[in-house]
Image: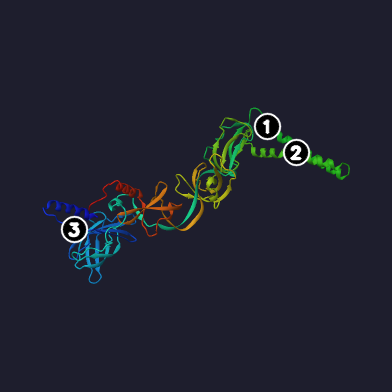
Amino acid sequence: MRYMAFLLFFAVIVTGCSSKQKTVEVKETVSETVWTAKSELFMEYDPPVAGEKTGFLFHLTRLSDFKPVTEGGLKLVFTPASGEPSTFTSPAPARPGIFKVEVTLANPGRYSLKLITDGKGFGDEITVPEVQVLNKGEKPADGHAGGGGAIAYLKEQQWGVDFMVARPIKKDMDSFVTATGELVPISSAEATVAAPLSGIISTAKQLPFIGKKVAKGEVVALIDPPVRPEGGIGQLSAAYAETKNRVALAQKEYDRAKRLHEAKIAPLKRVEEAELSLASAKAALEPLEKAIGSVNSEGNGRIAVRALMSGTVVEVTAGAGKGVEAGQPVLRIVNTGALWLKVNVPATEIGAAAKSLNATFTVAGLPDRFKPSRLVSIGDMLDPQTRTLPVLFEVPNPSGRLKVGLFTDVAIRTGSVAGALAVPKDALIEDEGRWFVFIQPSGEAFDRREVKIGIEDAGFIQITDGLNRDERVVTRGAYYVKQAESAAKGGSDQGHAH
């Protein structure tokens, strides 16, 4: 490959300049690729002839980052089937990742080759099972030249970009339904604090700001009595006193009716009527007692408005100096120690999602993957606009990192596959609805392979057909191989020289 271009060029010059027609024999370059756990060796050489000098070209790539070995020396040990081994060395790469070594082997036959790096920045031992050394005039046996693969993408090109080749892995994978979600307050963890009576928001106490933490029972606002008594503390007190008197009178009437009935003076009907009147009066008194208890006048006739629960102020709807009517909202409090995750599951995925409803989710801007603590409910009615079904999960939020209103990407686990053959998602190329990967038969040769895909999990895609466990796949930089394929179809020159 690399030397052939030069030899062909040389042959053309010789035949063109000579007055006699001569036949120039061009040797076919041998290329081999060997992988270890740490490195990839791609070597090229002309078939060596016993007693003659032969140039070997070694490309050495670290598999950890798929970058060239740039430091240290290389030792070559050629061991024949019988006899003493021959050792040759290269003190350093001629260029990053490329070692050039000239070798002379005295005897023909089959040799094994061991390459040993000196460990300066990278250490490995690589064994090439066979190198055939020929007698003069002997032709090499078939099957030693070339590396296979229809797409040429050179080592120097691979090293210059974000590129990686690896075998597919076996891993347990989960299948998921993906959907969008929103973090919302739990219904029981949200409260609106309203004015218990009419009046004016006092300027004597500053209203809480949005985001402020408040405790249950804390005074969050003061209300000055209104100019008119209607709806104010005076009216509440009068109503409370009047109703309390009614209860007392009803109680006395009930007690008297009961005594008279026991003395056989009054009929049972009078006792029953008195009992009903007492119950009615008590029912009217109960809400007034709660209202009086919640008002807790702070002196100067002001009414104290207290937080109904601990939490964070998320909305303030009143302002100091402004009038409010009884029941009018002043502020809203949400306890965000736990939230609900409302997930909109597509109608087409309901059947699969309902098998598990084991979910995880991510939020833009936060690096973690979060997991709800439990399933709260599954809706019974599809949203007519989005054709989705609402599903509620409860999410613990003790740190407060998750905020109400954030949108999420949710994955609901629907099943699992044990020992699936998988490749990183970046290894796949889509073309007209079909999926492909690029496999590497040898160091600088690649083939496009159509595959069938299955589930996706944590950045990996299951391959159900078209790929074997021991094949090497371009897992990063597949786009560059696709470019090389397109350039080759277009006739671009893919050759290079060292």
* Image disc number at residue 234: 1
Q: Which of marks 2 and 1 is nearer the N terminus?
A: 1
Q: Is residue 479 left or right of residue 201?
A: left
Tell me the kind of residue under disc 2. Answer: Ala
Q: How crowded is mark 1: few (under 14 residues within 10 Å), some or many (20 or more)?
A: some
Tell me the kind of residue under disc 1. Answer: Gly
Image position, residue 396 (x, y; %): 53, 49
Tell me the kind of residue under disc 3. Answer: Glu
Q: From the image, which quarter does the N terminus lie in?
A: bottom left
Residue at the limit of the structure toward the left, as seen here:
19
Q: Identify the image quadrant of residue 282.
A: top right
- For marks 3 and 1, give the one nearer the viewer: 3
Q: Which of 18 and 415 is in front in this view?
A: 18
- For marks 2 and 1, give the one nearer the viewer: 2
Image position, residue 475 (x, y; %): 37, 53
Q: Which residue is drawn at 58% across and 32% down?
A: 202
Q: Which of 494 and 382 is in front in this view?
A: 494
How many angstroms separate mark 2 from mark 1 (CA)? Answer: 21 Å
Q: Identify the image quadrant of residue 66.
A: bottom left
Q: Which residue is drawn at 64% across and 39% down?
A: 294
User: Is residue 92 in view from this perspective?
Assistant: no
Image position, residue 103 (x, y; %): 20, 62
Residue under label 3: 25
Q: Earlier in the sequence, mark 3 or mark 2?
A: 3
User: Is residue 323 in view from this perspective?
Assistant: yes
Q: Which of marks 3 and 1 is nearer the N terminus?
A: 3
Residue under label 2: 281
